[in-house]
Image: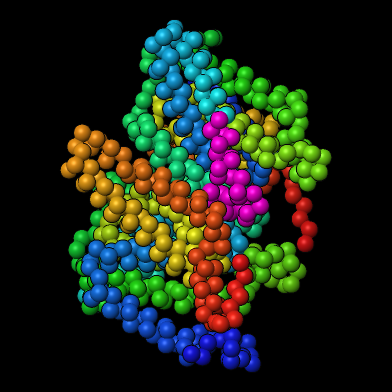
Amino acid sequence: MSYLPGGTYFESYQDDQKWWRTPFIKGKMILMLVLLALLPYLVGSQWLSVVYTINYYILAALGVQLLVGYCGQITLGHAAFVAVGGYTSAMMVLFVPWPEWVVNWGLAYPISIVFAGFAAAIWSVLFGLPSARVKGFYLIMTTMAAQWITVPLVITQYVSQIGGRGQSFSIPDGLIKIGPWVIDSDVKIYYFSMVLVLICLIVMGNLLRSKVGRAWIAIRDNDIAAETMGVNIVAYKLMAFFVAGFFAGIAGSFYISALFFVSPEHYEWFYSLLWVGIILIGGVGSIQGVVFGSIFVVMIFKLLEISVLGASEFLMSSYPEIGWITTKFIFFKESAFGLAIIFFLMYEPNGLSYRYWQIKNYFNLWPFSYTGK
Amino acid sequence: MDLFLQLVITGIMLGSIFALVALGWVLIYKCSGVLNLAMGELTLIGGYVCLGLYQRFVTVMPINYAFITAIFGTIIIGLILGLLTERIFLRKMIGEPILAVIMVTVGLSFFFKGMVFIIWDTDTQIFLPSIFSIEPIVVAGIAVGEVYVWSFVAAILLMVIFVSFFKFTRWGLSMQACADDEMAALSLGVSAKFVYALAWAIAFMSAGVGGTLLGNINGLNYSVSHLGLLVLPVVVFGGLNSVPGAIVGGITIGILQNLTGGYLDYYFPGGIKEIAPFIFMVIFLLFKPYGLWGWERIERV
């Protein structure tokens, strides 16, 4: 294997920053793509839905990772931007009088994705404006205010009333159509989500190795020093909010294709916190961290759900007299999740991507491995 | 004009509860630098503990004594829970990055919420037999519910106790020293761990009493924990590490909330009352990021 530390040297910055630095990485990536493409044939549709939920969390947490991990701007209101994306997309698909050929060619939903991205990005920049003046805790406050203003007030009280349906917009079958494909089965949702995730990860990776990404990282490490080096920090901070909002909009727009409806309860504050939790679990300041964190969180939820279902069935059949306790299991799940976050942060503060890096280095440097503590 | 006065006066009385809870928040932030997002769940726990104790005590003694005993019980349980929480969850997080500590408090809030629902269920519960009469007290044409008046009295009393504890006792002095300069305090023999534990205990106690009072006003359910989020606009307005700021901020936010509820609800139906403090907070942050009396941080590269 032509892995890095032993024998491969780079002579230019371009070489060092390439996507395919060694043939081994290329092979690994191609193997992964093949595996992802074959996944629907390997697992049941129950697990496919888990995978596209993971993909949704990756898309949403990507923006959080950009803001928190790369630009140092803490956000606790990302669900608001996802909500804006989801609602924009749903309303465009439902209410815009599209010309006949646009619908026939299946362009309405793809166009709405782009618009959803821009709408969420603009909304995000609006609430990112205070970042020009405040930072740290105070920025947490303004992004939280974004959550409270957007979801319970604007969306629940006003947007949901459009069309007189009350709480949620449901999207009829066949309206979510990309080109010739109607998104109507788990397999199609899975492929669609996978394509979106790959595109977004590549865009994010490319952004981070460009001038913009280096400016963000400079702002994260020390904003005053970055300013003295000639980085326009206000512009770059707002740009970070713009891009993060764009990813959020895409995430929201994708999720309506999986749910077939939008309602405010999918964008509660809990999700904002969850996405920050994901990047902390996965590792702050690493794109892989988003993926690891999303997989971990969704799998924890799924496993808790399976065990809770199993336990309640067992209890109901064996000890019906204490069957009432099964009604409490959902709260056990919530408590367990809270404890999981706490203990993860206590005992694994660097996140999963740090462990991944350690394992990788162990094998790279074998037999003379030393990878820190 | 009567409506306005009435809204303002109820606002002050409601705001005093906010101020009490915000006081606990500010003490934690001042002493240990932890931004606590679990404050809502602390109020929830306090409210339910007091309710449980009250239902036990009311069978053996008159209503008034039962309630006062229950409040004392809540304070003692809050003290114990505060010390335990600090010891188990927060002590290990000293020196970790700010976001990790915030997320630990978020995890705590999930944990507490789940536990509260496991133990007490999600239905709205009220204090029965009711402690305060429904008849409002009318002074010069302004009617104020009895429960508001007593909440105001209790909140002010507790605030006076906590503030004088913070100002005049030896333990309070060590808390002040730790808030002022942790290194210097440590080198002079103040135990920072003890101070952190004390701050969390006070937060639990004040939040518990706040939750009890709110539970008496509207009945006890999950919406009580919304107060924990209202604490944030309060402390931003007053300045994060200012005790008088928390009190003034609490009362201001109480008035603001009541006025928007009274006047704007007609034009913006729905939750404007809950959201108004946050909108106010964003605008306020743009002009005065450090609040009324918060310390301005001067940064050096």
- Going 17% across and 43% down the picture, which residue do you hit? A317
Q: Is residue A33 visible?
A: yes
Task: Please tell me which residue is depicted at 58% across the width and 91% down the height of the picture.
Answer: A8
Q: Is residue A14 above or below residue A344?
A: below
Front residue (pair B14, B123): B123
| Residue B92 is covered by the magenta coloring | yes
- Residue beneath the point at 27% across and 67% down: A48
A227 versus B292 height, above or below: below
Residue with the most extreme front position: A367
State the image quarter where residue A366 is shown: bottom right
Point out the image quarter for the C terminus of chain A.
bottom right
> What is the x, y in percent for residue A60?
43, 62
Report x, y in % for residue A90: 31, 60
- Magenta stretch in the rendered image: B80-104
The total of numbered circles placed on residues is 0
| Towards the viewer: A368 or B203 | A368
Residue B103 covered by magenta stretch: yes
Q: Tell whether B168 sits left or right of B101.
A: right
**Residue A14: in sight, yes or no?**
no
| Picture quadrant where residue B87 is located | top right
Spot occupied by residue B106 in the image (x, y as percentages of width and height):
50, 47
Is B267 located above or below residue B212 in the figure? below
Near-viewer residue (B143 or A210): A210
Question: Could you tell me residue B238's position as x and y percent?
Answer: 66, 37
Relative placement, left or right, of B241 versus A105 is: right
Residue B235: image quadrant is top right
Whether residue B244 is situated above or below residue A128 in the rendered picture = above
Using residue B214 as the reference point, say whether residue B250 is left or right of it.
Answer: right
Magenta part, dominant SS: helix
